[in-house]
Amino acid sequence: MSDPTTVDHGFVHVDTGAWVDQRVGDKLQELTSALSDFGHHDLFREYPMDRVDPMTRAELWCVARGFGVDEGQPVEHDDEVLTRPVSILCAATDTREAIAVVSVDGGEPTVYPDRTTDPGYWHQDDQVDIACTECAERWTWCPNTDNALVHGCGACHESSIADIFGTGDGSPFAPCTACAAVEAGDPDASCDGDHEPAIVCPTCGADCQLRLTDVPVCEVTPPAV
């Protein structure tokens, strides 16, 4: 797939599909089909389910099947950080397997095994990691909400963008390093023309990459249907 993180005018966006994939197992086709068919039963003739939003329909479906829905559900995220809005309903089947019902951009919900070790990870939509591929330095950053950093190598500790990457305009992004080298008169320097700002590792000087922050997950057994 394409890069799951993109930067647009200094704002970081995370691909919704990649974000969901971190947290779930393979699609549960039978449960997804059962949810899609829900509402066609004679009992619902006077309550057209196509007029009900996907998450309300999913919650009614869970109740009808005896699935327990977690408190504080559904979880809703807009497209400020994620590339498309998403709604998630976390539940437990009648045999206590964890599932997540996911609707992207208001579309038909899909049922997955929920692999997260804590439901709180469904609330974290605004974190990315600044990762250096040369020296393995890594910081977790909430780019569109604050300037705090959590250093992820060794003992975790908090700092700030200014502490690590300086206070220049656009920090932690620095102007294109290739362009800067050309302007400085380096005869071996050249730029491919993208002129993209980069995040320069303060430890080794290499360019850093933005990566999805790891989510602790557990192995799951597909629920019986």
Image (cartoon, helix red, strand yellow):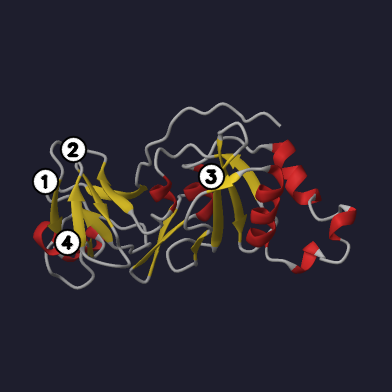
In the rendered image, the vertical position of residue 144 relative to residue 137, given as above or below: below
* Sequence-earlier tag: 2 or 4: 2
For discs 4 and 3, the disc positioned in front in the rendered view: 4
Label 3: element kind: loop
Q: Position of residue 99 (x, y in %)?
A: 57, 41
Residue that numbered label 2 is attached to: 135
The answer to whether the residue labelled 1 contacts the one labelled 2, judged by CB atoms less than 8 Å apart, is yes
In the rendered image, the vertical position of residue 63 relative to residue 168, given as above or below: above
Q: CA distance from mark 3 to mark 2?
A: 25 Å
| Residue type indicated by callout 4 | Ile
* Sequence-earlier tag: 1 or 4: 4
Looking at the image, which residue is at 20% across and 46% down? 206
| Residue type indicated by callout 3 | Met
Pointer 1 local density, CA inside 10 Å: few below 14, some 14–19, many at least 20: few
The answer to whether the residue labelled 3 contacts the one labelled 2, judged by CB atoms less than 8 Å apart, is no
| Residue type indicated by callout 1 | Thr
* Sequence-earlier tag: 3 or 2: 3
Looking at the image, which residue is at 15% across and 48% down? 205
Q: Which mark is on residue 1?
A: 3
The answer to whether the residue labelled 2 contacts the one labelled 4, judged by CB atoms less than 8 Å apart, is no
Residue that numbered label 1 is attached to: 203
* Sequence-earlier tag: 4 or 3: 3
Can you see residue 2? no
Q: CA distance from mark 1 to mark 2?
A: 8 Å
Q: CA distance from mark 4 to mark 3?
A: 29 Å
Left or right of 203, for residue 116 = right
For discs 1 and 4, the disc positioned in front in the rendered view: 4
Residue that numbered label 4 is attached to: 161
